[in-house]
Image: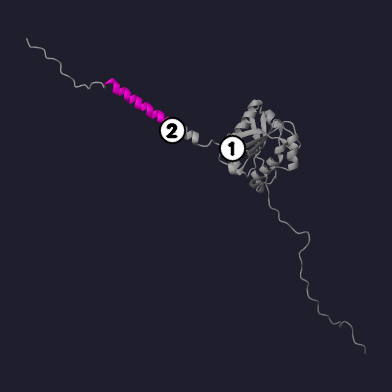
Amino acid sequence: MARARAPRKTGSVAAPPPEPAKAKTKAGAKAVAAKAGKREKKAAAAPAAPQMIVRHMNRRDIGRVWDFLKISFREVNAETVEYQRPRSKHRFEEVFAEEGIDQLVFEVDGEIVAYAECSYEVLGSDNWINPRYFEKRDMRPLFIDELAVHPHMNGRGVGSFVLEQLHHLARVHGLNQLVLEVAENNERALSWYKKRTFKKLDAAIFMAAPVRIDDELLPPRALPPPREPVADDSGDDEK
């Protein structure tokens, strides 16, 4: 009978001893901890980002906000038929005293970077709103009367923060729409609002047609030279 052969060795590698494995794990943990420490030190050394704060406007702010609005709307006003941003300082002071209007100031390091004014119903004699339009459509609007961002702050998220605050106010008061007015030629603002789900409600546009003007008085006219005297030969000489 043939003798059974012993099984061949497969050449498998023996597992590493436990101590070196533990040493490798400890070294990796130390490296991770060192990197985390560096990140924390770097974060602590970096200056804190400026904070945008929002608060209700008070009477002491009227002059500062008025000057801010003139700067913010300077370019728009120069190209807009209806000079409405802002209307007048006297009217601005009257708005502060009215009920049902929120005036919000947005600041960074004590400097005004944005302003928003909104109302919860149609107010005043100079409004541009037809309330029945919204009633028929079950729309409960928060009317945004003013929204201004400092020109130097464009593209830094200030406007988005203002709009987020206005959405929050609408939700708190049970309102389901934000409604505002934009000049038709303010293409930058129109594009910004359309990207944020705002839609045009109507097609009211200022239009103009040229008219040929006639002067009330006739223009100067050249004076003709004096006429030559004409001899009178109609009668006969006496005989």
Residue positioned 36% across, 27% down in the render: 28
Where residue 30 sits: x, y (%)?
Answer: 38, 27
Give the residue at mark 1. Answer: 158
Where residue 192 sits: x, y (%)?
Answer: 58, 39
Question: What amino acid is found at the position of numbered circle 1 in the picture?
Answer: Val
Give the residue at mark 2. Answer: 38
Residue 55 seen in render: yes
Residue range highlighted in magenta: 17-36
Residue positioned 44% across, 30% down in the render: 37
Q: Quadrant of the N terminus?
A: top left
Where residue 93 sits: x, y (%)?
Answer: 74, 39
Task: Label 1, secondary structure: give it.
Answer: helix
Question: What amino acid is found at the position of numbered circle 2 in the picture?
Answer: Lys
Task: Describe residue 77's horizontal placement relative to residue 25 as left or right.
Answer: right
Q: Quadrant of the C terminus?
A: bottom right
The residue lying toward the viewer, choosing from 29 and 52, is 29
